[in-house]
Image (tube, grey):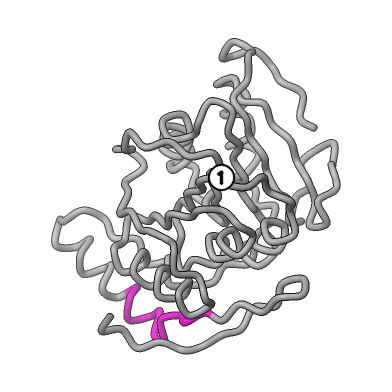
Amino acid sequence: MNLATVRRTVALSGRDIRLDLPADPELILRQALVVEQSGNSPYDPYWSLLWDAAPKTADLIWRHAWPTGLAALELGCGVGLAGIAAALAGLQVTFSDRVPEAVDLAIDNARANGVSHVSGLVLDWNAPTSQQFDVLLASDVLYDRSGHAPLLHVLRSMLADDGVVWIGDVGRATAPDFIDLAAEQGWLIELRDSEGHLIPRFLPLSFQLIKLRRGAAEPGQPLAVG
């Protein structure tokens, strides 16, 4: 990649992950504004940042005892931290993002951490593929309410019937809206804190892992959280 980067080390429980991040996120933001003003498809400039929920999400993924042979897709992978943790924990990982540069950098970061058997997918949530995965992973993707419906669309399309979704969030004010919408659509929802402990309700301004599974309830029926 012809992209200037800086190195950062993220400490997980008993494991350090080295990440290369774009050295000039402001340049990427300016490029996104140019693309938007030109009338072309919007370009997400925020992939180049390591958002706050990503390290805690990655640590929970790394510490979890996953069954062998599971296929995982990281949605909105950015620089790939959650997916790298999943690959190190034994999952077969595909990095996906709408921005091709993000997918390329995530794969490069995985290889720099000794993970070679990963793949990449440029993915628009409004146009999911026919592939399905046992595990769908994401972090810091709930900040924009307009993205909630497309996110749930891609979850419905690309999650295996008995699969699980893990989404890390730092307790943004927009996250309960996503949880409510998921419940309305029949998803079974569970919330856990940064240590993996079950919590009974959403906690504003605190990290939590939002876990989703396909539910037997009819869409529109209320589902208990937890």
Residue 112 vs 164, above or below: the answer is below
Q: Nearer the viewer, residue 125 or 196?
A: 196
Check disc 1: other Cα within 10 Å, few if <14, some if 14-19, many if 20+: some
Q: What residue is at 77 percent from the left and 71 percent from the top?
A: 13
Residue 152 vs 169, above or below: the answer is above
Q: Nearer the viewer, residue 85 or 153?
A: 85
Name the image quarter holding residue 186.
top right
Q: What residue is at 40 percent from the left and 75 percent from the top?
A: 108
Return the x and y of residue 27 as percentages of the image width and height: 32, 81
Q: Nearer the viewer, residue 98 or 38?
A: 98
Magenta range: 19-29
In magenta stretch: residue 28:
yes
Q: What residue is at 38 percent from the left and 80 percent from the top?
A: 26
Image position of 159 (left or right of 198): left
User: Residue beneath label 1, please?
Assistant: 70
Residue most extreme to the front: 68
Name the image quarter holding residue 29.
bottom left
Q: What residue is at 75 percent from the left and 59 percent from the top?
A: 63
